[in-house]
Amino acid sequence: MPKAINLTSSCGTFNFLRPQLAKGSHKGKNVLEKIAGSSLWVGEMKLDGHRMLVSSTCAWSRIGKDIARMDHIQNECPVGTLLDGEILPKSGAEGSDRVSNLRADDPTALGFVAFDILYHEGQYVGDLSWDKRRAILESAINESMEHISLSQLYYMNEWNTERLMEIASDRGHEGIMLKKVEAPYKANSRSAWVKHKFTDTHDVVIVDANAKPSEGRVRPGEVYRQDGKLYPAGLHTDPWIKGYVGLNYGFYDESGKLRIVGSLGETGPREDMEQYVGQVAEIKAYGQYPTGALRHPVLERWREDKLPEDCTFDSGAV
């Protein structure tokens, strides 16, 4: 069993474990071809909600923060069970922003899709292989539950990744997840799960605010922040914006050192941008250079649900 991270959490039954993560398919050449037709892998839809670990006594975000107003989901969790999954709207479109709005306005409109289980009847089961954990998960979740459901499975000896991506697109998902059938649950590891997304996004650490010339044209497609919101720079009423700075971003390497690998260009005024140093940003890009720098990076959103150390060279955005 991996070492638990003790937090000052309201949950008295379990210690928080950083959830298992996935590496992007762009990091392994021919990885999708190797998975296709293999009985050693299983596929799921990649859901666009909020990651959550939940039991009858607690609900945690992926970084260990207590998630409030999830009583309706917690009340359905069997005692002694800790589930891993995603909070999603029960109806309508997915999306992290929509989940946030519903959490504030109508939390009972949110359901929980369980795709893994860490504890069952008070016993840690993460050391078991995925297929054995899945059997336990299916025995713990029943169809009479109103707020908790199971993720749908696609066995890769019966499906190929192209067809799964078509299904994901038709259903409005972000992409697909691929998991090794024989692998145990590896907390805070990316070794046994692979994600394949429609858009190439990456989570990066903002390292510093890099001063730019006092006057210069902001390129179309870039963004700036004003009044707490992101705006396309190309739509700014004044195309000549003075005093803007770029945000240098980086990843943590295998030794745990934070490396600067690129810059987002003229992102916003210095007084606004410096407050984001040390935070995690999700970047949309058109590929990645061997150095780690992203091709044509565009700032998509700030990820308050992620820690800087999650941003490794092969992390991508989850």
Image (cartoon, rainbow, N blue to C red):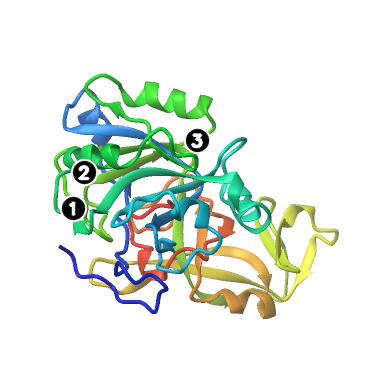
Asked if labels 2 and 3 touch by Cβ distance under 8 angstroms, the answer is: no
Q: Amino acid at mark 2?
A: Arg
Q: In terms of depth relative to the viewer, which is nearer, 39 or 234? A: 39
Residue at 45% from the left image edge and 24% from the top image edge: 167
Q: Which mark is residue 263?
A: none
Q: Which residue is mark 1?
A: 125
Percent coordinates x, y for residue 234 in the rendering = 75, 53
Q: Which residue is mark 3?
A: 173
Mark 3 or mark 1: name the one nearer the start of the chain: 1
Asked if labels 2 and 1 touch by Cβ distance under 8 angstroms, the answer is: yes
Mark 1 or mark 2: name the one nearer the start of the chain: 1
Taking 107 as reference, is 27 left or right?
Answer: left
Q: Residue extending furthest right?
A: 237
Percent coordinates x, y for residue 257 in the rendering = 30, 74
Q: In terms of depth relative to the viewer, which is nearer, 35 or 264? A: 35
Q: Quadrant of the N terminus?
A: bottom left
Percent coordinates x, y for residue 293 in the rendering = 42, 58
Q: Which residue is mark 2?
A: 133
The 10 Å Cα crowd at callout 1, few under 14, some 14 to 19, many 20 or more, is many
Q: CA distance from mark 3 to mark 1?
A: 29 Å
Q: Amino acid at mark 1?
A: Val
Q: Amino acid at mark 3?
A: His
Residue at 19% from the left image edge and 58% from the top image edge: 124
For residue 162, what is the image quadrant?
A: top left
Residue 15, placed above or below residue 287: below
- Secondary-structure class at tag 2: helix
Percent coordinates x, y for residue 299 in the rendering = 58, 57
Mark 3 or mark 2: name the one nearer the start of the chain: 2
